Image: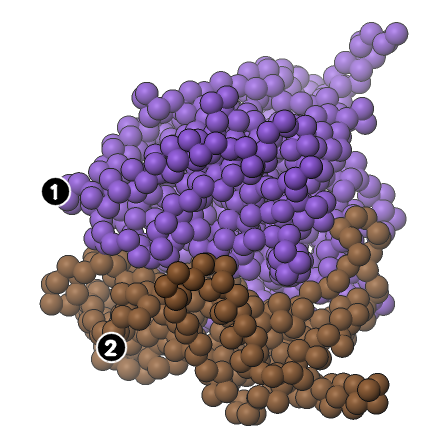
Chain colours: A brown, B purple
Amino acid sequence: MIALDPESAKRPEFIKVRIRRQDAPGQEPYWELHQIPYEPELNVISVLQRIAAQAKTLDGKAVPPVAWDCGCLEEVCGSCTMQINGRVRQSCSALVDRLLEDNDDEIVLEPMSKFPVVRDLVVDRQRLFRSLKRVKAWVPVDSYYDMGPGERQLRAKQEQNYPLSECMSCGCCVEACPQYTKIELKQKDGESDEAFEARKNEAFDEAFVGPNAISQAMLFNNHPTGKALASERMDALTGAGGIQACGNAQNCVAVCPKEIPLTTSIARAGRAATVHVIKKWFEK
Amino acid sequence: MAQQRVVVVGGGLAGLASTMKLAELGVHVDLISLTPVKRSHSVCAQGGINSVNDQTRQFGDNEWLHFDDTVYGGDFLNHQPPVKEMAYWAPKVIDLMDRLGVPFNRTGEGFIDRRRFGGTLYKRTAFAGATTGQQLLYALDEQVRRREAEGMVTKHEFWDFLGPMQDESGRCRGVIAQDMVSMKIKAFPADATVVATGGCGLVYGRSTMSVFCTGSAVSRCYQAGAKYGNGEFIQVHPTAIPGSDKLRLMSESARGEGGRVWVPRQPQDARTPRDIPQEERYYFLEDRYPEYGNLVPRDIATREIFDICVNDGLSIESDRMSVYLDLTHIPKTELDRKLGGILDIYEKFQGVDPRVEPMRIFPAVHYSMGGLWADYVKSSEGGLEAGAPRNHMTNIEGLYAIGECDYHYHGANRLGANSLLSCIFTGLFTGPSIVNYASSQSSGHDDVSSAIQESAIQTQQQRHDKLLKGDSGSGENPYLIHQELGDLMTRVATVVRRNDQLSDAVGKVQELHQRAMRVSLSDTGNWSNQNVIFAKSLQDMFPVAKTILQGALQRDECRGAHFKPEFQKTSLTSEEPAERRREAEVWCDEFEKNNEKFLKSTIAGWNPDNSMPDITYEEVDTSLIPPRPRLYGLVGGEVIEEVWKERAEAAKTAEPVPN
């Protein structure tokens, strides 16, 4: 910016980056140390871009570029989630100058631990999207023809729904959640892609649905047309791997990059679940 | 009849709107995307989506005026029938998005709130905070997930589209794509194919676009024989946050909500902005454009910001260019409610709170007005004929182009908040056209011979294998070539264009292209190899880059985003009324003469023999609104307008009465 930061004199000449790599699923992970020249205003994405371009480790060994996932680079797409210095977050908004303030020695990059590693920092987050199907996170409109506007909505309701609707399925919340455990299955010999897919989905559907999906269920139950499926969503949330699996650790809300009130959603879902179960009991 | 099967490539607003509409019409869709569709670049759109609405109508607004603003803003290079159809559909599109659950901001009474955007005097823009694109995309993503759960849609995410699959007659019979994890190459036969793959910002290295927006999908269609229209028209957004990996967008809504652009009158004034008194600030947009103020169309705002920094030397920093975009006079609660999302982005990436301190911004490449040439059928009302199979079909039969990747709607310059509209509109509107096309064919996805599929796969497999083997002695690094390409394109083909620089750049890009064709890769494996995928997209950026340069070189005029100072139309100089009038007459003569020559779409065809585009020109359909001079801020504009109106009237009365 205008004048150089007085701190900048203390900035290192190089940045060391330690990366936990893995060549493919089922392979042993290993650590690799890289180094790039320091520049002001870098983020972790630009660090990884420079590492990809130089494709050499600190001791000069030629290596394939580190694989990672990214998209918008402005924290709205949810692609670039990873563990940075032990904390799950988006790598685009992880500014190097800030990271160096906490640890001027090196930056440590690791893939998320709750999803199967595809390669290096890339993980397979299918399960996150599967959970949105599980809670029917959509508005069941009749058609896409012109039927006039939707129902009028007071500002208060919009202001309640909008933050929940900002969830970008990045997976930070489930990474931090002690109740969400990794599911990694291997395709069996002779198993078709479709059969493998079906087996994975079955496993996903029995496991904890996760704070993001609970919050989406609350979002759509609060929509004038979306609530037509409220009872089906509550069936999903009161079944196996539903709301009762939440251990109330409250880690999810602490790590959400969009500051979505996930624990508020979970509390709402908990109350709705009680009502739902009692109603179901009377309907028996 | 067997169920129809369509391949949609791209899962942004256009691709998802197309997918859900086709699924509703009973078609099975294979949706192919580089990324999980929920992460597509449409999420970055911030400001909003335009339509005429109950409130603006009471101020005299109507669909025709939205149509007029769009073609006037586009400097009349837009074919008018598609624009007309879009403007008339706009209110219906917003109603639908409202029904689908988009949390649009509300008025106190619960109506959808609206803000004003550039290039119009009406508050037409509906918005959901400052993340409207994200919210619209999510609503469509949810509907597509619903259709996927019903079995109507199969998603292929992390698949790279390698090219259309054509039969002997040239008809597109589906696509060839590659799994980005297993690197397996596969054919997807289809009755029709839709490309909805967005813009080509990465040709410029850094832009406001996401990393997926390489333009390579479009380039692969172009190299297969599809025509490319108006390539040289690239929108440079006036306000972006400079960054080393990306130039992050600062939405036009910041100005729509009252943001003011200024620089200190004293060059590189070292005081903090808060300490610079009002009279020492130069609000140059408000000063030069009293009517539109900070909300002039984007091309004009961009040039003014560029001009104030480059030519007037008033950049607020000495080592890099920027101006202030100031929101600090607006109450914080209002800012949080209406612009929270984008202000958070600024704060997160710059470490400065824009509610307290003015933002520092500078223009950045943002949108491709040009793209794949696409046909349409004009209706008797002057709009589009609903359901006509040729609507949005490229010149490759069976291959459709929609959204940012086609060349329609925005002419020489796009108005803010019209892109989300054009994407959703084209996705919805073309559904019945595609179904009718597929129904009219005697052969479909089941009849694509294995010979066609095998040979198309073979061609792609050879390209892939050859790259992996690489030219190990060349030492050419795809990432470094990309940087060179981006730096060059940014220097010569953005805000200001000069013929000597452009022709020089054509030679340089040719050289870079050759180097890119013999890259050696640092990853030669066949598992999740991002290196080879990037190398392919880099190679495919060159046909697009050359088309931008060549189109710009041959267009000796100023129109919308395309600005060549050498051919700039000057303001009137005389103060004396009769002389001023005479100058205006001359001005109008020149304007007419220039339109005869250049009011034409640039149409490029890829020539593989010399690896250059062949350029021809196409008449623009201006049958509904006659072209008129674009006079924002021009000195003497009112006299020119008067002369022009008289001529237009005279032309009308001179026309023979139709029998």
Label tally: 2
Asked if marks 2 and 1 touch (Cβ < 8 Å), the reply is no
Which disc, if any, is residue B473? 1
Q: Give the labeled residue for mark 2.
A: A106
Question: Residue sitting at 63 percent across and 78 percent down?
Answer: A214
Question: Residue sitting at 76 percent across and 71 percent down?
Answer: A229
Place of residue B479 in the rendered image (x, y in percent of width and height, measured from the top left): 28, 49
Task: Indicate left or right for A31 with B343 as reference.
Answer: left
Q: Nearer the viewer, residue A154 or B395?
A: B395
Q: Amino acid at mark 1?
A: Gly
Place of residue B130 in the rendered image (x, y in percent of width and height, measured from the top left): 62, 62
Which part of the image, by quadrant, shows the C terminus of chain A?
A: bottom right
Which part of the image, by quadrant, shows the N terminus of chain A?
A: bottom left
Place of residue A110 in the rendered image (x, y in percent of width and height, measured from the top left): 32, 74
Q: Please, is residue B468 above or below residue A4 in the view?
A: above
One can see residue A246 in this view = yes
Rendered image quadrant of residue B277: bottom right
